[in-house]
Amino acid sequence: MRASRHAIRQKTKVRVQNKKSADIHISGAEGIYKKTDIHRIVKKYIERALSHPKGRAEKIIITIEEIKQKPKEIPSLPLTTLSCSTPSEGKSIIRQLLKYTGVSKSAIDTAFNLIKKDNMRGAAVITAEKGDRLEPDRERGIRVSRLGISKPLIKTLSARLSRYNINTDTVKEALILASKVASCKEIIAELCVSDDPYYTTGYIASRNFGYLRIPDIKHRASKSGGRAFFVNEKANINEIINYLERTPVIVKEVSPCRGVTTVDEILNRHYK
Ligand code: PML
């Protein structure tokens, strides 16, 4: 589901480059479901688009596609929340962690500059060393699609997140998406800041340290946000796009979810 509203009507200051970018993204949702669940899920998606904190959607596009290929099965990334209380602390945590995964300062700067703007659509693909962007259509970016979690496991995940009071669709959907992204061999790490002005928790994720939530990564009411995938210098962008946008992937195992910890504890656990 993709829900949007027209920029001009909302009187929101956006950089209108062409007709396509005149729409403000309100909400997006994806999933792999059994046929019998379709009606329930479509209703849930429509309700979400019509009552979103970013505003009521004026256009809702729902695509339902039969998947013939057996989905690839992956585990979810282990989830932890980092102790962080200001955007500048969040940025410094991100720099520290990404440095350990081999992402250069210039690649991180490219990602922060993109996320700072409030008109980013899909994810950017950035090479970890030189900081070059690889997506063929920079305005559209990459849209991670065909992903889900098996029905019995959604209950397991909900129960684990409930222990830390974070059992929300936003956390579950972001974790499932990050788990698919991390299962792409060419991707070293992901950085995500929500474009929802009222959602100030972001994350960084990688196969090395899992899914690390970063509270207060941006100031409240800030419209900036976006996703960046850091990849090997010689990564094949077509293979990445084919995997992220078209290969069905389903979470078949839930990894541990932990409470709040510090960045030093993560670095000690994974890199010392
Ligand atoms: C989004 O807006 O969908 C991104 C949310 C990222 C963080 C989710 C979390 O709280 O873990």
Image (cartoon, rainbow, N blue to C red):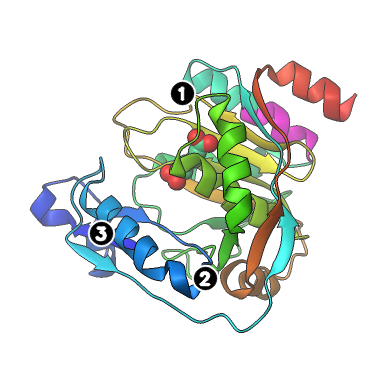
> Within the magenta stretch, is there residue 157?
no
Q: Considering the numbered disc 3 on the image, is that residue within a helix, a strand or a loop?
A: strand
Residue 208 % position (x, y): 80, 40
Magenta span: 94-101
> Which quadrant would the N terminus be assigned to in this image?
bottom left
Mark 1 sits near ligand 1, with its Cβ under 8 Å away: no
Residue 212 % position (x, y): 64, 33
**Distance of mark 1 from mark 2, alpha carbons?**
36 Å
Answer yes or no: do the residues labelled 3 and 2 have beta carbons within 8 Å? no
- Look at the magenta stretch and give its main secondary structure: helix
Q: Mark 1 highlights which residue? A: 216
Q: Mark 3 highlights which residue? A: 4
The residue depicted at 66 percent of the width and 41 percent of the height is: 205
Foreground of the two, 73 or 37: 37
Residue 211 % position (x, y): 66, 38
**Distance of mark 3 from mark 2, alpha carbons?**
26 Å
Of callouts 1 and 2, the N-terminal one: 2
